[in-house]
Amino acid sequence: MTNGPDDPAGEPDTRSDRTIVLGLIADPDMPEAIADHLAETLPDELGEGWRIEVDADPVTASLKGTSEILEQTAHLCDSHGWTYAICITDLPVRSEDGPVVADVDHDRGVAVMSVPGIGGFQTRRRIHRVVRQVLDDLHEDYGERHEPGESHVEHRHGLSSGVIRGIAPIRRKVATLEDSHLDVRYVTPGKRGVLRLLSGMVRTNRPWRLVFGLSRALAAAVATSAFGLSSSTIWMVGDQLDIGFKILTTFTAIAALVIWLIAAHDLWEKRDNTRSDPELARLYNASTLLTLIIGVVVLQVILFAVNFALAGLILPASLLTSMLGSEATVGTYLAVAWAFTTLGGIAGALGSSLESDQAVRQAAYGYRESQRRAEHQEREQQRERDEEAGEEAARQAVRDQATDEENTDEKNGDGERAAEENTAAESAAQENTGDSGERARDDAAADSSDGRQREAG
């Protein structure tokens, strides 16, 4: 027996004698952590007749669209012998109706859920609600309940709460394509849905990890800040500048590090990389920018706290008072720590250039996005290698043609020289022949003259 539309509890049927196995297929990194959390919390809610299994599948994580992911999910569901399977992915998905939260294939008992579509706040709780709703879709008698088009069936598990509707409503739509495996789609329409998707993409990147992922930049920032502790000039600069200039300098240092990271490690998405959906290029770039800004701000805050603590421990108030000419207060230590932090931030920007592209991607992005950008970079490098190989082949062809022409010219020159030599030889032979005839005639004439002289004598 399955739940009917009027079932107030909205709980999946657990009265069957057989165990219902739900497989959670997750991309590595954040989606896998979410799947593990669901595996711990869902069994108590679903009942004794349910079992949850988690599979982190890198093959699924390499796929580019929900249709491909649904196919792979259905394959894994059959191979594992699961009753249902839900793939949890950090792939951002867009449709004509807005950002996609989840796609459901009722006939094959599989679904895919996009973590970025959930948004960047209260992620686990919202994902929990969406999974419960998707399970209801998979477990109910779909054919008797829905007609193609938008579904007006009441959302359960908190998806239709006033807060959700007010912030970014999740709309449930029934597929209209007869040749598609897709049966139900959950979307967040409108500009608020796009903002939710963007916040989810930033949340998936986990920007706070950037601090410890950029080890060389962090080391350069800390080392430079420590050097500043010994410089009385930096103390005076930090103490004398007004608050407005300090704020401007702080923003400039943050912007410099963000721009440096983007430019040095080719983090800006080009539109030709996402031709199927140009809007994705803007979303990827916006999420990259926000991720780096948040990460760098966290770096600056941590660096400022460390510098403030070091200044309080190492610099006596009497020393600051004598050097600065005014009584050292907490504000003085804050100003000095700010100067160290700003200097360290600039050094961190320079130190970030020593990081490898792979290290920066791993620090700035989640697993799928890091892999996607790595694959794109590899394609770009392969394209450049192919272009260089083509240019080299063209240059070699030109060199070969020039060599052939030179060889042809040499052969023609050799032929001309041989002809000239033959002509000269023939001329010489003719001259020799003429000279021999003349000498013979001369000899004959001389003999004849001698004969006449003897006869006369």
Image (cartoon, rainbow, N blue to C red):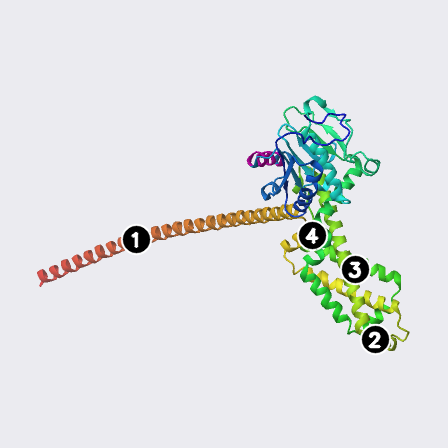
Label 2 SS: loop
- Within 10 Å of disc 2 (Cα), the crowding (few <14, some 14-19, many 20+) is few
As drawn, 48 above or below 237: above
Kindly identify the amino acid type of the residue bearing the numbered disc 2: Pro
Mainly helix, strand or loop, the magenta region?
helix
Question: Cβ–Cβ below 8 Å for labels 4 and 1?
Answer: no
- Of the two numbered discs 3 and 1 in the rendering, the one whose residue sits closer to the viewer: 3
Question: Cβ–Cβ below 8 Å for labels 4 and 3?
Answer: no
Kindly identify the amino acid type of the residue bearing the numbered disc 3: Val
- Within 10 Å of disc 1 (Cα), the crowding (few <14, some 14-19, many 20+) is few
Kindly identify the amino acid type of the residue bearing the numbered disc 1: Ser
Foreground of the two, 401 or 140: 140
Q: Which segment is the magenta one?
A: 69-79
Residue corresponding to mark 2: 316
User: Relative to 355, is 199 on the left or the right?
Assistant: right
Which badge, 2 or 4, is on the more N-terminal residue? 2
- Within 10 Å of disc 4 (Cα), the crowding (few <14, some 14-19, many 20+) is many
- Residue 52 on the magenta segment: no
Residue 266 position, x and y percent, is 67, 51
User: Relative to 437, is 85 on the left or the right?
Assistant: right
